[in-house]
Each structure stands twice: as C-alpha cells, then as structure tokens.
Amino acid sequence: MGTPGGDGRLPIIYVRGFAGNGGAINSAVDDPFYGFSQGSVHVRSDSSGRAQFHQFESPMLRLISDHKYEVPVHGDQWAFLQGVDTRSVNPASVWIHRFYDDSADTFDQDPESFSFETAARDLFKLIKLVLDRTGAPKVFLVAHSMGGLVCRSLLQRVIPEELAATDGTIDPAAGAKYVARVFTYATPHGGINFAVGFGLLERIRDATGIHGADIFGPDRMYDYLTPAARRRTLRRESFKGTEMPDDGFPVSELFCLVGSNPEDYDVALGLSSRAVGPRSDGLVQIDNAAVRGAPLAIVHRSHSGRYGIVNSEEGYQNLQRFLFGDLKIQIELVGFTVGRDAPDEVEFQLDVGVAIRGLPVLVHEQSAAHFCPVQIERWREGDPIDSPKPLLTTFLSSQAPRPLVGGRVVPRLRHALKLRLLSIAEKQGRLFFDDHMEQTEDWQDTLVVDIEPPSAGQPLPKAWAAWNSTIPSALRDWNPEEKDRLRDRDGAPNRWSGRIEVPDVMKPLLGENAGLQISVTPRVLPL
C-alpha cells in the first residue's frame, strides 16, 4: 500500500466566506457543505454578455467524479473523525470547516458571537485531526472570500505562535508543515475598500465593527495576520495585506482566483457593487484580490450568486489544475517595443484570454471591457522596457485524461491565447478621442498551442504553436507540422522553454524581436 496522499490527492478542507449577521449565519449553517456543493446553470460566454446554459455540478461533485474524492459525513464530520481510528480514513476526502455553527440561533437561543481568531484556531484543530485520521502528510486548503483570510491567519500567526520555541522564537514557515497548497476564491487579501465616500465608509466600518465587518479593515488585518513576535519589526504603518512574509508560507503554493464581474452581484439590491466600483467582483476590488507574487487568474465572475466564482466552471478548472497539476506553464512577452513611434500621450493596453479545448469558458480573462487589461509599458528612448514581461501562469496535469475529439482520444492538450492590443490618448488624466476608433484594436491575434505532456520516456514536454492569422483552416482542423514545433531554448534538464515570434506584418508596431516565450517546469507536491 502506498503512502497516504502519495498519489497527489491530499485531504481538502473548505473554508467558506463571511456571513455577517444572524439571519445570514443561519442560512449558511443550514447548508451541510457551506456552499461548496452549490452548482450553476448560467454562464456569460458570448461577446454580447448574454447568458448561456451550462450545467456546472459544483466543485465538490466534480472532485468526486473527476478525482474520486469521498465526502464522509455520517451525521457530523467532526464527530465522525473523533470516533474513528488513526489512519483509517481515505486521504482523498473533503472536509468542511463549519466555524459558524456555534453562532446560529437555530441551535441555541443564546448563540456565541462569531470570532475570527477562534475560526482560525479551530481550523488548525481540524487539520491536525484530519491528518491523524487519514495518515496524509499535509492538506489542501480551499477558501472563499473571508475564508482565505482565515487560512492566512492560520499560516501567518496561529501555527507559528502555537509552535513557538520556549524563548518565543517563531518559524514563519511552520504552516507549510501541515498545508501543501492554498486556493482562494475572491479573497480580499488587501481588505475591502469602497470607490465612494472618500474613505468615510471604511472608517465607520472599522470604528463600529458593524456585523463584524471590521475584519476587512487594515487594523484588524494587521492584528490577525501578524504574530506578536514580529510586531517590533513590522509596524502597522508599513503593513500591506497583499504581502506575505518572504520567509513564511511559500506564495508559489498559494493561488488567487480573482473575479471581474460586479454587475451580477446583486447583494443589497446592487448597492454593494456600486459602492465598491466597476473594477471588482461586486465586493472585492481586483487590486485587493491577490497576494503579491502568487499565481493568479482573473475570470468574469461575481463574488457570489447565480454567476458566482465558486459555483463556476472557470473556478473549478483553475482549482483542479493548481491542486493536482504537475506542470507549471508561464507565458511572457519578450522583445516588445510598443509605442516607439507613437506620441507621448498614447497608452497601450492588452486584452488577454485563455481558452482550453473542450471547455465553454475562458479560464483566464483580462480585458479593458472588464476594467482589467494588461498595461503595456511603452518604449521610450533611453528607458528600455523590462523584458521578458510576465503575462500569465497556469498549470497542467500530465496524468489528466486526454480530451475526446470526434470520438477519439487526442494525445495533445490544445490551448488558445487570445491577444488584443488597444491604444488611447490620455493627457493630464483625461482621455481624448480625436482619432480614436471605438472597439477597434491596433492588433489582434490568437496563439494556438498544442502541448504533449511528459511521459515515461520523455521527461520534458513537446510543444507546437502557430498564430491563427497564419492557419489556413478552421482551428479544429489544424494539424501541427514540424515547422510549428517550438524548440527547447533552455537546455536545463528540469525546464523546457520555447519562443515564437509575432507575425512579420506586426513587427513594425510590436517590435522587430517581439514574441512570446513559453516555459514549462515540472512541479512537485511539497510533502
């Protein structure tokens, strides 16, 4: 029998988001799985934004069907774990951190007040119990919204302080002894800010602690994310919620899924989304939804609801790739000298979208229409552009089943990277439209990439790529030829890197040496 969790299927603990007041807490507690079993049937997948039907079962059911996870309940997951023997439970199992139960007045007329710090400490108790009963070396944490902050409090303060030496010395990375990877959906890593009120709403929230929402303000965040032993060196005034300690839990093992659809977040009759602003998921602003240096993806989903980020195909695809993927794919812009001949007031933005064969959604999407394009630094004499410029990071599993196309299994994984470059004139903070062509791009193309994952006799992947503008057939009919194969330019035994130039016709605009660099690195689960 192999080591528990040795196949990469570690126990998953789900930590839900903020419920607020008593009625919302009662609703949260009524759900046996705190929202992790909720699915959806709506997706906005066409250019008009109209809803299309797509039946997504839920992340929990997909983990069961795709990865053979189990969900032991037996009336009470916590009681079940306490009543079974050590190493007697399947490590490939899903557990719900039910931290709101004691705060529901449906069980007790005098319920306990919710405590964020208690939720973080109890999460550590649950992790240790799950590890003992499954025999797994570590767990995966999956969290929505505030749940991601609970996980960070666990990793940055609770575990380091509980395992501190007798002299008070802490190990900031102690949480990595228990947690392998963390995936956060729409977590306000940088807190929650409003686009209206000039800071007044935030000050009222933090001063009154209304419904406990002060946990999203900088003072409370500093408190529950910073161990006491570090407060002499990390002062409140220099604290940033979007940064984690360099010597702490590795940010490479934390993934941030960010939403960009505020319109479909209808909480409080839409007042929340209007207060937070358009560059958000309706509750969390995009700039606050990721940790600096951590891999991330942006999807056009709302914070929750019918078009929510947890109950979405986009969310699940990123989740399973990050947790189980053994290949890290990085794409970078290289040699771009955009704007070399443009007037000083012209700025450039790049829309980016990632499609995967067989999926009806984009797994990553940044666009000007959603207020989150990639800002392209323009070339200026004497001020060279930093190159390569990271564009996106995603993950693949070499063990994942190959897709069926026309009834047969295809040996390669096909991805499409959609790129669209736009420019606009801006002077002193104002936009000028004298020669502007609305919804008309300076350049648009799609890079189609086929990847053949490593195998027993092939330690590194192979890749083929071509620009859609050079493919004379429909994409589904494209069969890569030898000329389309990307050669390994790295030479390292544990890393593959290839490059493709932009089409010749676009080099005067983008740069004579402009291209995309694709790097593939094998990834080992940190056990």
Image (spheres, helix red, strand yellow):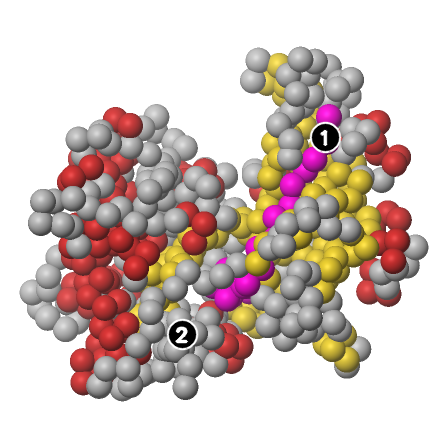
Residue 392 percent location from the top left of the image: 59, 46
Secondary structure state at the residue bearing disc 2: loop
Q: Is residue 267 above or below residue 323?
A: above
Image point (54%, 49%), residue name: 298
Query: On the image, which quarter does residue 272 sit in?
Result: top left
Q: Is residue 241 visible?
A: yes
Count residues near mark 2 (Cα–Cα under 10 Å), then give few for <14, some for 14-19, many for 20+.
some
Of the two numbered discs 1 and 2 on the same chain, state the one appearing first in sequence: 2
247 or 155: which is nearer to us? Answer: 247
Residue 70 percent location from the top left of the image: 40, 81
Secondary structure state at the residue bearing disc 1: loop
Tell us which disc is closer to us: 1 or 2.
2
Residue type, label 2: Gly
Mark seen at residue 336: 1
Q: Which residues are magenta?
A: 312-337
Queried whether the magenta region covers residue 321, the answer comes back as yes
Determine the CA span between mark 1 and mark 2: 44 Å
Residue marked by disc 2 = 5
Outermost residue toward the right in this view = 472
